Image: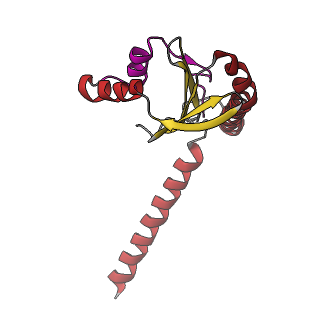
Amino acid sequence: MSFERLRVYDAGRFHEVDLPDWYHEANRLIEVERIDWHRALERVLDCEHTLLTEEGLLGGALEIRFWPSEIHGIFMLIETPLSLVEQIVVPNPADWLPFLSRHLAPLIAVANQSSLIALHGRIGNAFIAWARHGKGSHIGRETGESRIDLDNDRDRRRAQQARAAMERERREGRT
């Protein structure tokens, strides 16, 4: 789960440094004690993380967390449910607000907008299914899509296959 280097935001600029000792210690905790990456970071940074993006929001592709460590600065992770996207340390607390407003706020806004688009898509699908077929359990809970058309298509295909099989039997019986 680790990168080879760590990005640092200092005095309005980014640069990369070798991974610090506390980062290696967090990786060691993962391997030896089999604990979660976020918990390992909490232990080595001696603070709890804060989630900057909405937890559990549909379509929430990005999670942004930060650990405000008094000793090591503010460590931040940008992740997707499948992978680590970026990790940044802001060593000087005075740089946190400019970093947050200049770099994270636009990213958080985009993540929230994409989540809302996905949510509106679900609501739209549920409304269409309800408008076409009325109330019932035929509407998928996760997608909001109607199962009636899919079920009807499946039934039509089966009926067509049965008719074709009967026609084959009829032709073979006459031969």
**Residue 141 shows up from this direction:** no
In the depicted view, which residue is nearer to us: 125 or 119? 119
The spot of residue 82 in percent (x, y) is 47, 39
In the depicted view, which residue is nearer to us: 118 or 40? 40
38 sits left or right of 15 in the view: left
163 sits left or right of 32 in the view: right
Identify the residue at image location x=72%, y=27%.
105
Identify the residue at image location x=32%, y=22%.
35
Magenta span of residues: 35-59
Residue, far bottom? 175
Identify the residue at image location x=48%, y=39%.
5
The spot of residue 19 in percent (x, y) is 44, 34
Q: Does the magenta stretch include residue 115?
A: no
Residue, far left? 32
The spot of residue 122 in percent (x, y) is 65, 35
Quadrant of the snapshot with the C terminus: bottom left
Query: Would you identify the image quadrant in which residue 171 lies?
Result: bottom left
**Residue 158 shows up from this direction:** yes
Marks counted in the figure total 0
The relative height of residue 49 versus residue 12 in the rendered view (above or below) is: above
The relative height of residue 132 versus residue 45 in the rendered view (above or below) is: below
Quadrant of the snapshot with the N terminus: top left
The spot of residue 76 in percent (x, y) is 56, 26
Q: Does the magenta stretch include residue 56?
A: yes
Identify the residue at image location x=62%, y=22%.
54
